[in-house]
């Protein structure tokens, strides 16, 4: 692919960044087949598979089953799995505004009913670096940090005052001493650990967004993207032909995971 210069618009800055070459080879590793409705991965390449019955299974990097969570009926459908900390996995049940924290063997550590803390409408949650929880309260339009008991630790001002526009993040990430909130229609806003706005990145309409180390990954149609946060370098690759339609992707620093028709394809890349 020809190298070309494009601009990424960031609040207060318009830094120049360069399109990476399309010379990265994807190497097929394996396929996991079965009843797979959704999945996520952690930074150790453990895979967490959610089946159509809401059962969660943990597989290690070799594909061996190491744990199962079977309490599948109490809170309805799992709407988010956060495995960014392999020692504590969070399940979020949006319909019941409930967070269940599991240990590395998928045993229940504790449960938080957000409604008991006057939080009723939340799309996205995330683990924080200090084992607390970030969430975005849609009713108050605030990023909040709570502890494992659901107690409020900090909150931002109302985003409608902070950004002078509505904002509805679908994903939250705690990485590299910053908190990233992603609204596909508005982009990414970056906050420090005290809840102060640091900057914004106008990455729009990326699907399957994932932030690992200093890179932001995402996809559109048949293309995989990577944006380097520190140096503003932006790479893209055409996906392998079998993966170009109707996939759910996830990423680690060395692997691409793609779910298609209840088959989870695993590729290495660099």
Image (tube, rainbow, N blue to C red):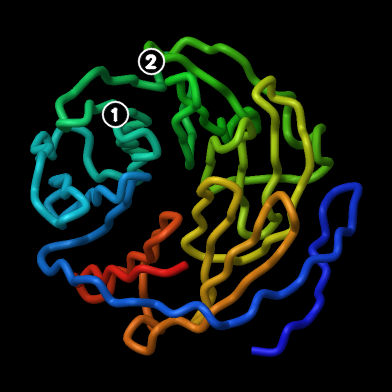
Dot 2: element? loop
Residue 231 location in percent, x, y?
74, 55
The residue closer to the viewer here, 247 or 105, is: 105
Relative to 66, say whether 239 is above or below: below
Residue 26 location in percent, x, y?
39, 77
Relative to 10, say whether 221 is above or below: below
Residue 21: give its label.
Answer: none
Who's the residue at 54% across and 60% down the image?
A: 217
Residue 235 location in percent, x, y?
63, 71
Residue 186 located left or right of residue 90 = right
Residue 148: give its label.
Answer: 2
Q: Residues within 10 Å of mark 2 (few under 14, many from 20)?
A: some
Q: Quadrant of the N terminus?
A: bottom right
Who's the residue at 42% across and 20% down the image?
A: 131
Residue 95 located left or right of residue 163 = left
The residue carrying mark 1 is 87
Relative to 181, say whether 222 is above or below: below
Mark 2 vs mark 1: in front: 1
Residue 168 location in percent, x, y?
61, 46
- Please report whichever mark, 2 or 1, sits nearer to the chain's N-terminal start: 1
* Quadrant housing residue 239: bottom left
* Quadrant housing residue 161: top right
How far apart are labels 2 and 1 at the CA level? 14 Å
Who's the residue at 46% across and 35% down the image?
A: 125
Q: How many marks?
A: 2
Who's the residue at 81% across and 40% down the image?
A: 163
Dot 1: element? loop
Residue 179 located left or right of residue 156 = left
The residue closer to the viewer here, 175 or 57, is: 175
């Amino acid at each position: 692919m020809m190298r070309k210069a494009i601009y990424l618009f960031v609040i207060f800055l318009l830094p120049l960044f360069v399109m990476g070459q399309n010379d990265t080879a994807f190497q097929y590793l394996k396929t996991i087949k079965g009843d797979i409705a959704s999945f996520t991965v952690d930074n150790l390449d453990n895979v967490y598979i959610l089946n159509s019955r809401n059962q969660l299974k943990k597989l290690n990097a070799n594909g061996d089953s190491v744990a199962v969570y079977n309490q599948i009926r109490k809170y309805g459908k799992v709407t988010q799995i956060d495995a960014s900390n392999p020692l504590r996995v969070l399940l979020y049940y949006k319909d019941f505004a409930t967070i269940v924290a599991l240990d590395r063997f998928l045993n229940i550590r504790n449960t938080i009913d957000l409604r008991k803390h006057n939080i009723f409408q939340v799309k996205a949650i995330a683990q924080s670096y200090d084992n607390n929880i970030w969430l975005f309260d849609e009713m108050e339009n605030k990023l909040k940090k709570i502890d494992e008991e659901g107690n409020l630790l900090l909150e931002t001002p109302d985003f409608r005052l902070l950004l002078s526009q509505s904002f509805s993040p679908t994903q939250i990430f705690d990485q590299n001493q910053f908190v990233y909130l992603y609204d596909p229609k508005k982009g990414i806003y970056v906050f420090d650990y005290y809840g102060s706005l640091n900057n914004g990145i106008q990455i729009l309409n990326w699907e399957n967004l994932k932030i690992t180390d200093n890179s932001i990954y995402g996809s559109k149609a048949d293309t995989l993207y990577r944006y380097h946060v520190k140096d503003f370098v932006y790479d893209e690759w055409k996906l392998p032909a079998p993966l170009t339609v109707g996939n759910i992707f996830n990423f680690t620093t060395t692997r691409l995971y793609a779910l298609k028709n209840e088959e989870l394809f695993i590729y290495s890349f660099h």
